[in-house]
Amino acid sequence: MEIIVCQEQARVPVTIIRLKDRINLGNVEQLIQKAQEAFANGVRDLLIDLTYVPSITSAGLGTIHAIYKLLNGESSSGKEIAGAGTSDATRKSSHLEILNPVPDVRRVLKIVGFDAFIDVYDNQQEALLAF
C-alpha cells in the first residue's frame, strides 16, 4: 500500500493520510505506524483520504477504529486490527474524518456503524472545515 502524508492548514493544522490500495491484514501495520508516528509528532487532527482504496477488510476497519481511539485519548494498543465494533465509540470524533470513500467502502463504513462516530466527506475543503 502506498501512503502519502501531507499537511493542510484549516482552522487548525490537519494531517492528511492518502492511501492507495486495498486496506487489509497484509498492510494495516503500515497505516497504524504512520498514524502513531504522526501522533507522536504532535498531530491531533487527521483526515484519512480513501479516494484510491477500492476495498477494506475487517482488519482495515479495526485499524481505523484504533486510530479513532488514539486521537480521542482512549486507551488502545494500536493493534486492534479485526472486529472493531462500535460499542465504545460514544461520540463523533472531532479529530478524525474520512474523505471520499468509493461507494463499496462507504457502504461498508455505514454497515458497521462508523458513520455514527466518524464523519465522511466527499470534498476535501468541506472536510478541512470540519476540524
Image: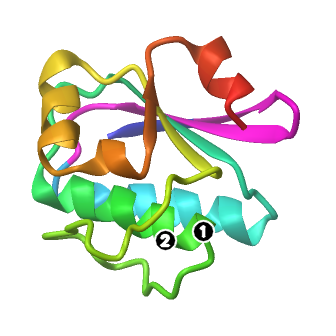
Query: Where residue 54 appears, x then y in whole percent?
Result: 18, 25
Tell me the SS state at disc 2.
Answer: helix
Where residue 72 is drawn, which disc sits there?
1
Label 2 close to label 1 by CB (< 8 Å): yes
How much space separates mark 2 and mark 1, taking CA atoms?
5 Å
Left or right of 90 on screen, residue 93: right
Which residue matches tag 2?
A: 69
Q: Amino acid at mark 2?
A: Lys
Q: Amino acid at mark 1?
A: Asn
- Please name whichever residue, 2 or 112, is drawn nearer the observer in this view of the structure: 112
Look at the image and tell me in which quarter the N terminus lies: top left
Query: Magenta span covers which residues?
Result: 5-23
Q: Is 2 colored magenta in this rendering?
A: no
Q: Residue at x 30, y 58 (%)?
A: 28
Query: Where residue 47 appears, x then y in whole percent?
Result: 57, 38
Left or right of 37 on screen, residue 48: left
> Total number of numbered labels?
2
Query: Where residue 67 appears, x then y in whole percent?
Result: 47, 63
Left or right of 112 on screen, residue 28: right
Q: Residue at x 88, y 32 (%)?
A: 11
| Image: 26 above or below 104 | below
Decide whether the magenta segment is chiefly helix, strand or loop. Answer: strand
- Please name whichever residue, 86 or 49, is drawn nearer the observer in this view of the structure: 86
Q: Is 20 colored magenta in this rendering?
A: yes
Q: Residue at x 14, y 33 (%)?
A: 55
Tell me the SS state at disc 1.
Answer: loop
Q: Residue at x 68, y 65 (%)?
A: 39
